Image: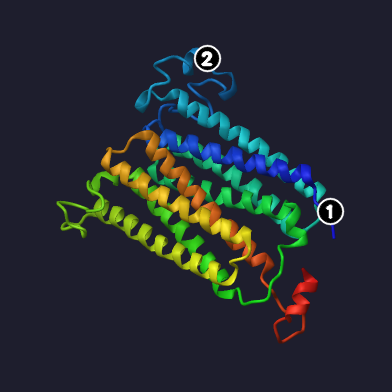
Amino acid sequence: MKSPNRPLYFYSLFVVLATLGLIFLGALVTSNNAGMSVPDWPTTFNYNMYTVPFAKWLTPQAMQMGDGGVFWEHSHRLLASFVGLLTTALAIWMWIADSRRGIRVLAVVSFVLVVAQGILGGLRVTHNSLTLAMIHGCVAQAFLCILIAIALMLSPRWESGWKFRAGNYRSLLIASWVLFGTVYLQLIVAAIVRHEHAWSALPQFPYSINNHFMPPVHNFAIDIHFGHRVLAAVICVMILWVSALAFKKLRNDLSVVGTVMLLIGLTAFQISLGAHIIWLQRPPVTTTLHVVNGALILATSFVLAMRLGHYQPRPSIGSKTEPSRAELEVAA
């Protein structure tokens, strides 16, 4: 078994953290309507992005939000280019240092996605397109998951595997992947709500309009916002379902139980943030935290699904039966 490359593993974690920071800054730009504060790309006010005079983006006026949020939009561009360089270096390092096919595939995918993200972000500006802005935000979440997959596969425990225990994990594994897919769908719907300014279509919480739980009237903004709330309720039920399965089948596995408990905590915090967005009329910081916390829920559900998929007991090649407890303990 190949020994883990710890420097590469820790570097991959750094890239994941930098990407989370980029998602935070991008959400802050959108929450403050600063997305078109810099109207050109790849230049910034016709300057090279890296040589923009400080007077153009570090003045009090440039640091204002809304149409004057030049500082936030330009900072987002700079951090995005930094993450692009980090990802390129990560892909090259992975390709050189690790011969596993899965790692090399992820290296190529991560590089392609980070290039695509840069182009999407630029086209969003040059075409002033909300549709491209929504796609840009959704691809960012997929890119984060690819980086997390890389970090997991580079981790010291991946090759040795998590401890095997006898039991049927299939229902828990399927539930975790269904949860991940549903959370990603929710983030797509949330991107539409944000960029179409549909957050105010239902001005009450937990009610919708005029103390009705179901909206008494319908249009696109109301329906997409209500769909966002319905999906949130579905995800809460699914997390409880996954948690019940995890405690039933793997109650002694601290890594799985800890991940599930983290999911529950993040979800409770997400509901609180969503409620305060309605009650406080979309404060930028709260709205930004809502986006980032949603990314953390997606990431946590993805980690859970990948771990379960990696150490789920499988019969040996050619075998028609599940391995016995003794065989699993030897494999561990």
| Residue highlighted by disc 2 | 54
Residue 103 rendering spot, x and y as whole percentages? 73, 55
SS at circle 1: loop
Q: Which mark is residue 138?
A: none
Residue 2 rendering spot, x and y as whole percentages? 84, 57
| Residue highlighted by disc 1 | 3
| Quadrant (top left/top right/bottom left/bottom right) for the N terminus | bottom right
Q: Is residue 186 above or below residue 17?
A: below
Q: Amino acid at mark 2?
A: Phe
Horizontally, residue 183 falls left or right of residue 246, namely: left
Q: Nearer the viewer, residue 175 or 105?
A: 175
Identity of the residue furthest to the front in this view: 252
Residue 242 rendering spot, x and y as whole percentages? 50, 66
Horizontally, residue 216 falls left or right of residue 281, namely: left
Q: Amino acid at mark 1?
A: Ser
Identity of the residue furthest to the top in this view: 55
| Quadrant (top left/top right/bottom left/bottom right) for the C terminus | bottom right
Instruction: Give the color scheme: rainbow, by chain, secondary structure or one colour.
Output: rainbow
Mark 1 → mark 2, Cα distance in angstroms = 47 Å
Q: Determine if residue 86 is in view.
A: yes
Residue 177 rendering spot, x and y as whole percentages? 54, 65
Whether label 1 touches label 2, CB < 8 Å? no
Q: Nearer the viewer, residue 196 or 309?
A: 309
Q: Is residue 259 above or below residue 252?
A: above
Quadrant of residue 194 in the image?
Answer: top left
SS at circle 2: helix
Q: Nearer the viewer, residue 42 or 273?
A: 273
